[in-house]
Amino acid sequence: MELAVVPIEKPEDLNFILGQAHFIKTVEDLHEALVTSVPGIKFGLAFCEASGPSLVRTSGTDDDLVALAAKNALALGAGHSFIIFLGAGFYPINVLNAVKMVPEVCRIFCATANPVDVIIAETEQGRGIIGVVDGFRPQGVETEEDVAKRKELLRLIGYKA
């Protein structure tokens, strides 16, 4: 077995969801879950098929995001993994439960806009995701001033009243 680190390539502020599923129907079901969760959502998704022709299957509502998802899925090359890139102004918090409720979805590795390194294990058979490094190490514990800033931000972006 060999280990590899595959960085997710994306614009700095773009959110994405990385997960694992188990069936070719995943592409259509994820697409449906996303468009019924948030009207007008912009996204691209790619799924690494793990049997048969073993293709990267794609779908979405934005061609550039679909191409970005396909590029990253191919770089990961991990069977039954999927990646969803969300367009500007769309966030994982708005669709994550719908994604998790898709019957084929087995796990979510991360949902973030942070820089992410994906830890891959490769055997003679193929590749699999071991885990992710999502963002950076903590630099300390928040102060009262940091708490106030966090709460202010949540209210500014409309996630708390």
Image (cartoon, rainbow, N blue to C red):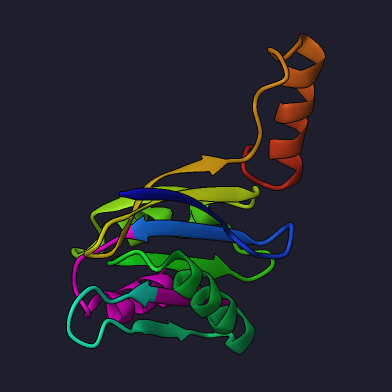
Q: Observer-nearest residue: 23 or 144?
A: 23
Asked if the magenta segment contains residue 26, the reply would be yes
Q: Position of residue 50 (x, y in %)?
A: 23, 73
Query: On the image, which quarter does residue 150 sit in?
Result: top right
Asked if the magenta segment contains residue 17, the reply would be no
61 sits left or right of 102 in the view: right
19 sits left or right of 44 in the view: left
Up-down relation of residue 103 to residue 53 (above or below):
above
Asked whether residue 25 is in view, the answer is yes
Q: Position of residue 110 (x, y in %)?
A: 46, 48
Residue drawn 69% across the image and 38% down it: 154
91 sits left or right of 128 in the view: right
Up-down relation of residue 99 to residue 155 (above or below):
below
Up-down relation of residue 120 to residue 42 (above or below):
above
Residue drawn 72% across the image and 64% down it: 11
Q: Observer-nearest residue: 159 or 128?
A: 128
Residue drawn 46% across the image and 71% down it: 73
Asked whether residue 40 is in view, the answer is no
Q: Position of residue 34 (x, y in %)?
A: 42, 71
Query: On the image, which quarter does residue 56 sit in?
Result: bottom left
Q: Position of residue 67 (x, y in %)?
A: 57, 83
- Bounds of the magenta span? 20-46
On-image quarter of the C terminus: top right
Q: Observer-nearest residue: 98 or 82?
A: 82
The image shows a total of numbered marks equal to 0
